[in-house]
């Protein structure tokens, strides 16, 4: 079975997340992807990405290849 991922280990990305329990979304980065977890289940395939500089795993919709795209997403989430 081949499972393609949008990002690869070593890719530099920007993360959109809520900071320290804050209600507002912000952008963190750039950081490098260090680990990818893939779960295959009856509901499909789930992909999670980890960056050693940050705590936690991130979904693909939280990661962006450019700062501009990440800022635009964070601003849209904060409206």
Image: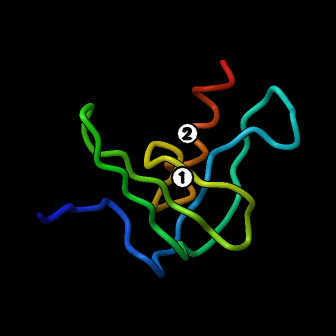
Q: Residue at coordinates 29% horizontally, 41% vertically from top-left? A: 41
Q: Are marks 1 and 2 in contact (CB under 8 Å)?
A: yes
Q: Callout 2: helix, strand or loop?
A: helix
Q: Residue at coordinates 63% horizontally, 46% vertically from top-left? A: 16
Q: Residue at coordinates 57% horizontally, 58% vertically from top-left? A: 67
Work out whether 71 lies above or below 51. above
Instruction: Classify 10 Å Cα crowding around label 2: few (below 14), some (14-19), many (20 and above).
Output: few
Is residue 60 rendered to the left or right of residue 32? left
Q: Quadrant of the N terminus?
A: bottom left
Is residue 32 rendered to the left or right of residue 20? left
Say which residue label 2 marks: 72
Residue 21 at x, y percent in the picture: 87, 34
Q: Quadrant of the C terminus?
A: top right
Q: How is the image coloured?
A: rainbow
Q: Callout 1: helix, strand or loop?
A: helix
In which image quadrant can residue 28 be found? bottom right
Disc ID at residue 68: 1
In which image quadrant can residue 2 be found? bottom left
Is residue 13 rendered to the left or right of residue 79? left
Give the residue furthest to the bottom: 10
Work out whether 24 lies above or below 64. above
Nearest to the observer: residue 78 or residue 15: 15
Nearest to the observer: residue 71 or residue 37: 37
């Amino acid at each position: 079975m081949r499972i393609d991922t949008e990002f690869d280990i070593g890719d530099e990305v920007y993360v959109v997340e809520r900071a320290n329990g804050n209600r507002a979304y912000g952008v963190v980065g750039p950081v490098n992807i260090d680990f990818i977890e893939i779960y295959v289940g009856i509901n499909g395939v789930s992909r999670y990405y980890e960056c050693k500089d940050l705590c936690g795993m991130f979904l693909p919709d939280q990661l962006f290849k450019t700062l501009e795209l990440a800022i635009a997403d964070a601003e849209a989430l904060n409206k």
